Image (cartoon, coloured by chain):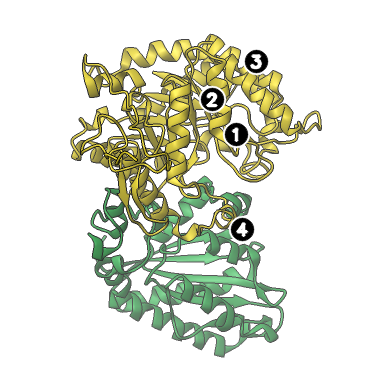
Amino acid sequence: MQFGIMSVSDITRDPVNDYTPSEAERIRDLVRIAKKTEEVGLDVVAVGEHHNPPFFSSSPTTLLSSIAAQTETLTVTTSTTLITTNDPVRLAEEYAMLQHLSGGRMDLMLGRGNTAPVYPWFGQDIRQGLPLALEAYNLLHRLWREDVVDWEGSFRTPLQGFTSTPRPLDDVAPFVWHGSIRTPEIAEQAAYYGNGFFANHIFWPKEHTKRMVQFYRQRFEHYGHGTAKQAIVGLGGQTFIGKTSQEAKDRFRPYFDNAPVYGHGPSLEDFSSMTPLAVGSVQEVIDKIMTFREYVGDYQRQLFLIDHAGLPTDMVLEQLDLLGGEVVPVLRKELESRRDPEVASNPPSHADLVRAKYGDAEPRQPRPNANRGDNVTGASPYQDSEGAEAVYPTL
Amino acid sequence: MTADTFHLVVVSAGASDPSSTKMLADRAAQRVTSLARERGHDVRVSVIEIRELLPELPQALSSQFMGPKFRAAIDTLVDADGIIAAAPVYKAGASAAFTGFLQVLDNDLLIGKPVILAATAGTARHALVVDEEMRSLFAYLRTLPVPTGLFAAPEDFSSTALTARISRAAQELVLLMESGFARAVRGDTWGAYQHEYGSAGGTELGIDLSSDLMRLATGGSHRADQG
């Protein structure tokens, strides 16, 4: 089972010290946090995407490739990549590039984004958010699997004879998760393609998560990717760990009370009892996380939101020590001992996907054909592409 | 419980206890109950005091995060055959607690349900709040407000005219409950209204796998002409 952290990349005033970090500090510190995540034995770092202050992560692949370059085993991913306001062609290109540079230690999670003003900045309309997301992924899926794509849809200029470069590493598309809280169409799309389904699992009562995961599992089986219990599920979550229950609550409360989104609303106690938020001693946090599998089944990835709401970096690093040192080792052991033997422990890695596609054979390494120097690809862009290679007259 | 047992839900935004708003709602509830019994139906009455939900209202308004009392109120409304909705008038409008409560409910929670609208105010000058403000809110929620709206200023509480209006509104509500309109609408034509997954207070869990969007989700086009 994979454990990791997810950051929304907010730059929030620390309400205790009345200190607002600069963009430069937060960007630098998230790289520190990511390296620490690997150091304490966790597996995944995910970063969100936003295009307005107070967030810094507008260019996730640049950040993630830097993190990948400074780590050895960590999987870098997103939480989430906007499949609505990004051009799927650019997503195909950027994330294939990240896949090459990280040696396959990446995947990505697609979401719609709920900040209405962002849509018009990129020429889109939030009211069309759902069809836009569904159509854009259909295209992204093909761009990574077909050398040459002819495509026409409702939200983007048509493509004729288009090749997205670079082709994915080993010609195997990155693994994709679809994130949604209560949109069955997104779960259906994840199931149809045999992709992963990720539930935010932070602001909402667990019933939302339970329903959507159940539906996704059923449909995953319906489309023949495996049995329902084998569907690939990831969950978010939020923790704050203290030496004692009281210490955890006392230290976290000012951040909770002033947090963006849920701050100035429900009490820490109410929110903890009604959502998956786990604030308490090591044992209390373990106990709460152990309940997740009871309503989603055995799952493959658990991400925690910890660098959020103005928590100072030192406190985040300390939380990582506790998470990696005391909480996750117990969770790994307990969750694996309860896991159905027919259910995979981890989501598919790049190596798994290569093996699934090629068995013991060598993976395909696309080599472009020469062209006439006009930089426009012909009908068969790669030496092993199907169809005849374009033959140009000798001048 | 027989099919003829009506579940009547009183939603009162009265600010004190007792409040004139609650008293007006109670008189209507009593009249509905006795009329229905005369006509051979049993009536079960539930009361939602919005005042008791107020601690949970801010988070419901800001993040649709429903506390336990809100959840219980919503579950009660899902099951209602008829509703009496009563608000005090503050600053020339139905109280913020009342409109706030209704504004956080799912749009499809109350579809087709018959409602008696009632308001109280310090003077008769606010008499049109029921018909001009509350009626449009309940129209938006696709409820069926009875033709007679109830309004009471202090002098009305001792007038026989108010009693007569209460009887009229109660009769209208009983007839609408008897007609089975809400049940028919929510049964036969439910799909004709807009729903979200998990809406209608968490009861709307149907998923139409043959919709245009579902076709798009599975690699097709959402434009019907393109399959």
Task: Tell me if residue A96 comes above or below residue B175 in the rendering.
Answer: above
* Residue for badge 1: A269
Tell me if I can see residue A349 in this picture: no
Q: What label does residue A65 carry, if any?
A: 2
Callout 4 secondary element = helix
Q: Earlier in the sequence, mark 3 or mark 2?
A: 2
Tell which tag, 1 or 2, sits nearer the viewer. Answer: 2
Q: What label does residue B51 carry, if any?
A: 4
- Inspect the image, locate mark 1, and give the three-letter code of the amino acid beneath it: Glu
Could you say where residue A174 lies in the image, as x and y percent from the top left?
A: 37, 30
Callout 1 secondary element = helix
Evaluate whether label 4 is on the same chain as label 2.
Answer: no
Q: Based on the displayed image, in which of its 4 quarters is residue B15 positioned? A: bottom right
Residues at discs 4 and 2 in contact (Cβ within 8 Å): no
The residue positioned 33% from the left and 23% from the top of the image is A170
Task: Tell me if residue B90 comes above or below residue B109 in the rendering.
Answer: below
The residues bearing labels 3 and 2 have C-alpha atoms spaced at a distance of 25 Å
Q: What label does residue A95 carry, if any?
A: none
The residues bearing labels 4 and 2 have C-alpha atoms spaced at a distance of 54 Å
Residues at discs 1 and 2 in contact (Cβ within 8 Å): no
